[in-house]
Image (cartoon, rainbow, N blue to C red):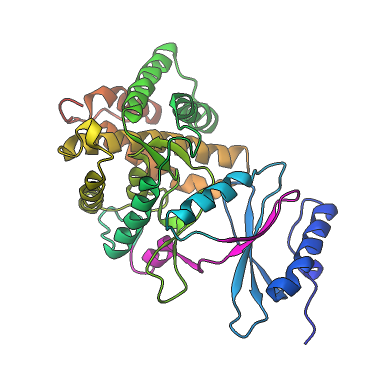
Amino acid sequence: MPKNNPSKHTFDWPNADRKSSFDHWLNSLVGTFSLDESTLTLASSDASFRRYFRIFSMAPDSRSYIIMDAPPDKENCTPFVVIAKLMGNAGILVPEILNWNEPHGFMLITDLGHQTLLEKLSLDLDLNDLQSVPPVEPFKKALDALLLWQKATTADGLPAYDESVLMRELDLFPEWYLNKHMAVSLTLDQQNSLSSIFSFIVKSNLSAPKVFVHRDFMTRNLMIPKEENEYRLGVLDFQDALLGPITYDIASLMRDAFCSWSEEFVLDITVRYWERIRLTGLIDQNGWSEDFGEFWRAVELMGLQRHLKVAGIFARLTIRDQKPKYLADTPRFINYIRKTSERYRELFPLIRLLDSLENKKPENMFSFGRI
């Protein structure tokens, strides 16, 4: 049976030259990988300028592959290639790079599956219900991958997630969420208050031991493997990984951008992680191996840095990049910010700022003692 030429597919392309380059590159791979060009479909897109296609082979097993389309003037694929190798060498299930057309930003990689952990959980749970209690088993597998990643850390393997990066991310909150999304101009006193809070958060963040950090380790980027005998979750979207606080990825996993869990479940999984990471010696220097309370505070303050950053990013995606779907999840992050800030007296000014912006009356707040 004759196969359709990919040029007949009705995918949007920025210009005819890029479409022609893609068609030529894909045609060059048909023989090597027995690709069936008529099966090319759009698999997904993300908050960046990347998008992904799925294509099947003509072999009897109809094996599927993923194609990454990452315009080189907007996306640098080199970190993806470097980090995929680091993660694969650590024993983590990540896509294997089969062909990379570096000049044009096209990449053929192995397909880890059709279903994310987020999608699987959504079949049985209301992901917006703060009392949701997911099954523990997939999160144990997520911790397996996270621990492999952190234990593979080398001092010179990735760029530093340092003070300048942490602060630059925090600045997205006033710039994009407050100023451009909510149309609020902070007073000088409010600016100074926010600056002091940011310094407090980052000081805590930088006190954490340094490990490889995925930076978006959450259910949407964890894949249910399509191979029935595969015991690992697949890991995606790792190209922004840095060397930074050990608290970041567990905070990202448990304070998810797209779903919320009960506090009991969040604590349960975090304790399970702490019990395992303390055995590695990675948190000995902070005394966290013997004190979960201190470790938990550090995780919360790391999560707060992420929540403020993501609120700014989601506003930017809406305003600058015309991707409004992300803004629907912003209330989740404002809730995270509020709940964390209510627990620490040093963060009370942040609650007062949010109250003033949202015309809310101050509530009684209860804080932990010393941080």
The answer to which image quadrant residue 283 occupies is top left
The magenta stretch spans which residues? 96-125
Q: Quadrant of the N terminus?
A: bottom right
Taking the image as drawn, is residue 168 in sight? Answer: yes
x and y percent of residue 103 in the render? Answer: 75, 48
- 320 w.r.t. 91: above or below: above
Residue drawn at x 63%, y 42% as measured from the top left: 321
x and y percent of residue 284 in the render? Answer: 22, 36
Residue in the foreground of this view, choosing between 311 and 210:
210
Residue drawn at x 26%, y 50% as measured from the top left: 273
Residue in the foreground of this view, choosing between 57 and 340:
57
- 1 w.r.t. 33: above or below: below
The answer to which image quadrant residue 228 occupies is bottom left
Q: Quadrant of the C terminus?
A: top left
Taking the image as drawn, is residue 237 in sight? Answer: no
Residue drawn at x 51%, y 47% as measured from the top left: 326
x and y percent of residue 360 in the render? Answer: 32, 30
Magenta stretch containing residue 69, yes or no? no
Residue in the foreground of this view, choosing between 179 and 2:
2
As drawn, is 235 to the left or to the right of 106? left
x and y percent of residue 192 in the render? Answer: 40, 14
As drawn, is 133 to the left or to the right of 116? left
As drawn, is 127 to the left or to the right of 235? left
